[in-house]
Image: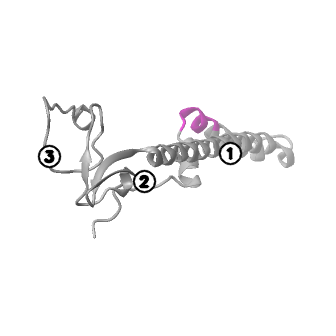
């Protein structure tokens, strides 16, 4: 009824989105403009228009290669980061009382009705109601509020 106790992962950027982001670099923008200008001038003003376009195309090809390498590198980093996050999420466990028995479960498997047994320094994996506390209870909400 309530679904899985986990935050859905954010949508990954596509390769085209990463390429667009990489192309926004000011140096690459200047190189693209220079490549287009060189292409136009080389094809119209050069003594030999049949080869004058080569320099402009070479600049644009170099810019394309830089954009592609940057985008692919960012995509690989994003994939590695997601794998690391998934691994960490699989390792998060909590002690609960379920059906009258104490168990250690993954935090994603926490359901309504489980009594979570929290120790010092524990991160509360869900919203809940405090049933009983012993000693002084303090909560650090700086991660939520900044």
The residue to which callout 2 is attached is: 9
What residue sits right under mark 1 in the picture?
Answer: 64
Residue 23 rendering spot, x and y as whole percentages = 57, 43
Q: Residue at x 86, y 49 (%)?
A: 50
Up/down of 14 relative to 62, above or below: below
In front here: 76 or 118? 118
The prevailing secondary structure element of the residues shown in magenta is helix
Helix, strand or loop status at disc 3: loop
Q: In which image quadrant can residue 133 be found?
A: top left
Name the colour scheme: one colour
Q: Around disc 1, counting alpha carbons within 10 Å, would you say few (fewer than 14), some (14 to 19), or many (20 or more)?
A: some
Quadrant placement of the N terminus:
bottom left
Task: State the CA–CA distance, disc 1 to disc 3.
Answer: 57 Å
- What is the spatial separation of the Cα atoms under label 2 and label 1, in whole angstroms? 30 Å
Residue drawn at (54%, 34%), measured in percent from left and top?
A: 26
Few, some or many residues within 10 Å of mark 3 (<14, 14–19, 20+): few
- Which residue has dot 3 on it? 130
Residue 55 at least partly seen: yes
Q: Is residue 133 magenta?
A: no
Q: Nearer the viewer, residue 125 or 31?
A: 125
- Indicate whether 108 appears above or below 92: below
Name the residue located 73 percent from the left edge and 44 percent from the top edge.
Answer: 61
Q: Are marks 2 and 1 in contact (CB under 8 Å)?
A: no
Residues in magenta, as a range: 25-31
Do labels 1 and 3 touch, CB within 8 Å?
no
Label 2 vs label 3: CA separation?
Answer: 28 Å
Give SS at disc 1. Answer: helix
């Amino acid at each position: 009824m309530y679904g899985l106790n986990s935050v859905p992962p954010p949508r990954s950027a596509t390769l085209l989105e990463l390429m667009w982001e990489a192309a926004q670099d000011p140096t690459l923008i200047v190189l693209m403009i220079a490549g287009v200008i060189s292409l136009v001038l080389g094809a119209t003003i050069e003594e030999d228009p049949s080869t004058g376009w080569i320099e402009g195309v070479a600049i644009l090809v170099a810019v394309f290669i830089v954009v592609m390498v940057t985008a692919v590198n960012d995509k690989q980093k994003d994939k590695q980061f997601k794998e690391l996050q998934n691994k960490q999420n699989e390792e998060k466990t909590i002690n609960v009382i379920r059906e009258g028995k104490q168990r250690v479960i993954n935090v994603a498997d926490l359901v309504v009705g489980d009594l979570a047994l929290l120790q010092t320094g524990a991160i509360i994996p869900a919203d809940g109601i405090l049933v009983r506390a012993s000693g002084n209870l303090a909560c650090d909400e700086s991660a939520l509020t900044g």
